[in-house]
Amino acid sequence: MINLEVLTDKVNIIAREVGSFIREELGKVQQYQIVTKDHNSLVSYVDQEAEKMLVTGLKKLIPNSGFITEEDTVDHYDQEYTWIIDPLDGTTNFLYNIPHFSTSIALKHKDELVIGVINHIMGDELYYGWRNGGAFMNGRDIKCASTEDLSASIIATGFPYAANYNQKPYFEMMSVIMKEARGMRRFGSAALDMAFVANGRFTAFYETSLNPWDVAAGIVICKEAGAQVCDYFGQDSYYNGKSIIVANDQIIKQLSNYTAKFFDQKDIPNT
Ligand code: IPD
Ligand code: CA
Ligand code: CA
């Protein structure tokens, strides 16, 4: 049986090493080294090299583990233990020299997420947690916000990249939150948005059209920090990131009432 606490320590070391590499490359990527994967979805050698470093390091920790990664530098396959990795979450920020991006690493055992690590590289904040072990930032316990009051809450969100999608439900939802909450943020790294929910900076985060590597680590850390997680329809199909809300149990009820009111599954673009 794997000791999750010991394993998390080792993952943290790898996350920090990869973070140093990414930090070193900030501001160095040339235009010709940027590839457009899809409309508004960019990638460079930094994402790819970081992912290779992670795969090499993590494979050594659990030799027969599987991988689900954003940049496809390794074949995707599920094993008893599977790593779910976004080497650089917030690539657009990174490429525009905006110091807000992260590395997100999760471990799944069979169907259960058991470890989450998110490195806020430029903030020198390492967030991590493991199942039933708690959530931490740089060695300190963290807890999600306890306020039940939207008017005292900062709410984070993001928007789909797709060129043509029905923007109406996104604007309708935002117009309610803009009125009711203290403020809204769109920072550009879903993993960091979730880390900031875990330590109470943001009271909630909601977004659609994400992927498992955007949310897996955040799910573990947020749950361990006391937050609830659901999809836009109040159900638990959030692991794939198609729609997700994280917040304490009172705020998540309020937000999921709005998302269920404004959104229909068919309005949510696939990634
Ligand atoms: C993106 C970020 C962003 C979210 C996008 C993601 P990437 O990830 O998490 O905040 O709004 O939907 O794709 O492409 O920078 O890894
Ligand atoms: Ca991402
Ligand atoms: Ca990424």
Image (spheres, rainbow, N blue to C red):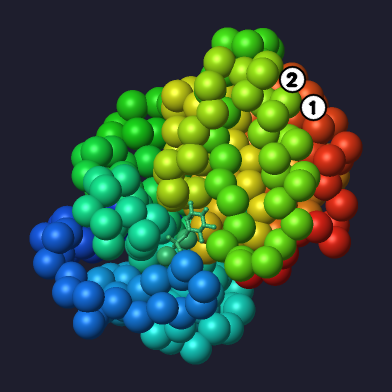
- Residue type beneath disc 1: Lys
Graded by Cα atoms within 10 Å as few (under 14), some (14 to 19) or many (20 or more), the crowding at tag 2 reads some
Res 253 label: 1
Find the distance from the CA under tag 1 to the CA under tag 2.
5 Å
In the image, what residue occupies the spot 39% across and 49% down?
A: 118
**Figure quadrant of the C terminus:** bottom right
Q: Residue 233's image quarter?
A: top right
Circle 2 residue: 250
Q: Is residue 97 left or right of residue 111?
A: left
Q: Are marks 1 and 2 in contact (CB under 8 Å)?
A: yes
Q: Is residue 46 left or right of residue 69?
A: left
Residue 77 drawn at (x, y percent)? 58, 83
In-front residue for pair 21/81: 21
- Residue type beneath disc 2: Gln
Mark 1 secondary-structure assignment? helix
In the image, what residue occupies the spot 30% across and 32% down?
A: 139
Mark 2 secondary-structure assignment? helix
In-front residue for pair 229/265: 265
In-front residue for pair 214/265: 265
Graded by Cα atoms within 10 Å as few (under 14), some (14 to 19) or many (20 or more), the crowding at tag 1 reads some
Q: Residue 122's image quarter?
A: top left
In the image, what residue occupies the spot 72% across and 26% down?
A: 176
**Residue 264 seen from this side:** yes
